[in-house]
Image (tube, rainbow, N blue to C red):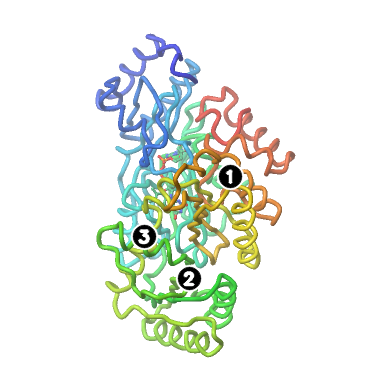
Amino acid sequence: MTHDAPSLPQAFLDEIKSALSEKSWSLDPEEINPHLEDWRGNYRGHSQLLIKPASTKEVAIAVKLCAKHNIPITPQGGNTGLVNAGLAHGEVVLSLKRMNTIRDVDPLNNSITVDAGCILKSVHSAADDNDRFFPLSLGSQGTATIGGLISTNAGGVAVLRYGMMRDLLLGIEVVTADGEIWGGLRGLRKDNTGYDLKHLFAGAEGTLGIVTGACLKLLPTPRTATAWLALESPEHAVDLLSLFRNEAGDTVTSFELMHKSGVELAAAEITGCRDPLPNELPWRVLVELSFADEKLAQSTMERVLEKAFESGLIADGTIAASLTHAEEFWKVRESLPLVKRGFLTSVNHDISIPVSRIPEFLKECETKLKSDVGNIDIFAFGHLGDGNLHYAVAEPASAEHPIVKAQADHITDLVHTLVTSMGGSISAEHGIGLLKRHELPDHKNPAELETMRRIKRALDPQNIMNPGRIFTV
Ligand SMILES: Cc1cc2nc3c(=O)[nH]c(=O)nc-3n(C[C@H](O)[C@H](O)[C@H](O)COP(=O)(O)OP(=O)(O)OC[C@H]3O[C@@H](n4cnc5c(N)ncnc54)[C@H](O)[C@@H]3O)c2cc1C
């Protein structure tokens, strides 16, 4: 849809107004405006109508009316998505934010049932109040909603141990594209009664239906040991990860790689951020282990680090002495996406490749970019344990003329071509949206893409659910 899209039919607006409570819709541009810009100010959308239902029933009524009048809908949660998928470009905005009730916590079943508009942080708190733990953790957790996290199949910093959002999903409630309610909020670990449809909605970016509720896995609260380490190279980091996995098995929860340049920028730019271990070595690793017992967590960390020192994999390091100390480490890691030169103003890539090939990728990509584009700066960091890097290409501090922004498409093409040639993915955790839609056919198997289109046509024959995101039908 373009800015010239015709205004919504009066008959549709009249039906919406009479079917929904007055608080559940708005035509006021001032109220709609904040829903039309992404958090970085990179994208701007437009829409005439905001629907903000208070219940699943109201979502179903609204979707039925949209289907009746053939009006496209963009579902929106916290609007923290990074691929221009949740901003309306002429569609009606359907915000789940008012649906934010924790419906039920069942500590014995280790599950929590919530509205889709619940913010991740409030799910953490509700779990904590019941002496339980919800493991999904990412920088946007104070704003991102459960519906958005499911719809992007979010990852974050503990995927190594607990998996992505999809892996934490026991049941789902969805309003389908024809406005029916599918109440699939079962809190079961075992349910082999045919196709497991909930997984279709994980990562669908709102293109198949509207997630209105979810039943999520909880775990007993773990005790953690956290260390900040200085290393010579990504090769050392990959070997260190392997050592940790051999010695500590699945207790390795996070293994985050950062270049020292990003850490230094975060410490300089972001309030409350401090470099935990100023050091000349170029790379840092933040590693976290989770156990049921705190002493065991600490002693295992110490034992593995001793071996790592002995074998020369790390040259310096510090173990967090308290939770507050560990939070200081995490503050640095979580601030990296907020660093201006390193991320906010650079050309970014959210890629994954087999862990074993990451050192080779880093070397080859930098060489190619520097010979093709010029003397650019690279800020690479990410979830090394998952083979997921955030790879930012930035203007050099000394640049007289911008070269990166001017060649953004060429840079991305170069990075993504190399990623695909190494068996990787051009979107590890952020999704496709409108941002990478044009690239997908070059990187996805045609049969796979066509199967996705068939699923979309079957579940949303009118193409009203967030049309054009991921692909065009
Ligand atoms: C500082 C920062 C750090 C981040 N770190 C990470 C990270 O480590 N790992 C990671 O994976 N992501 C990360 N993200 C990305 C982001 O937080 C996720 O994409 C998040 O999952 C989006 O949730 P949201 O509620 O904001 O959804 P939105 O941005 O509102 O929407 C995202 C997509 O989901 C759809 N959608 C939203 N709600 C629903 C619903 N109820 N039903 C159907 N479709 C829906 C939208 O249409 C859109 O396509 C980060 C973002 C920021 C700003």
Q: Can you tell which quarter of the image residue 318 is in?
A: bottom left
Residue 468 at x, y percent in the picture: 55, 29
Which kind of residue does numbered mark 2 sit on? Pro
Q: Nearer the viewer, residue 302 or 165?
A: 302
**Mark 2: secondary structure:** loop
Residue 39 at x, y percent in the picture: 36, 41
Which kind of residue does numbered mark 3 sit on? Leu
Residue occupied by mark 1: 412
Q: Answer with mark 1 or mark 2, whichever residue precedes in sequence.
A: 2
Distance of label 1 from label 2 (alpha carbons) = 25 Å
Q: Can you tell which quarter of the image residue 130 is in?
A: bottom left
**Mark 1: secondary structure:** helix
Residue occupied by mark 3: 265
> In the displayed structure, would residue 250 be above or below residue 263?
below
Foreground tag (1 vs 2):
2
Distance of label 2 from label 3 (alpha carbons) = 14 Å
Q: Nearer the viewer, residue 209 or 250?
A: 250
Residue 83 at x, y percent in the picture: 48, 40
The response on whether ligand 1 sits within 8 Å of label 2 is: no
Q: Nearer the viewer, residue 338 or 203?
A: 338
Residue occupied by mark 2: 282
> Dot 2 surroundings within 10 Å: few (below 14), some, or many (20 or more)?
some
**Residue lying at 46% horizontally and 34% vertically, measured from the top left:** 175
Q: Answer with mark 3 or mark 1, whichever residue precedes in sequence.
A: 3
**Mark 3: secondary structure:** helix
> Is residue 275 rendered to the left or right of residue 202?
left
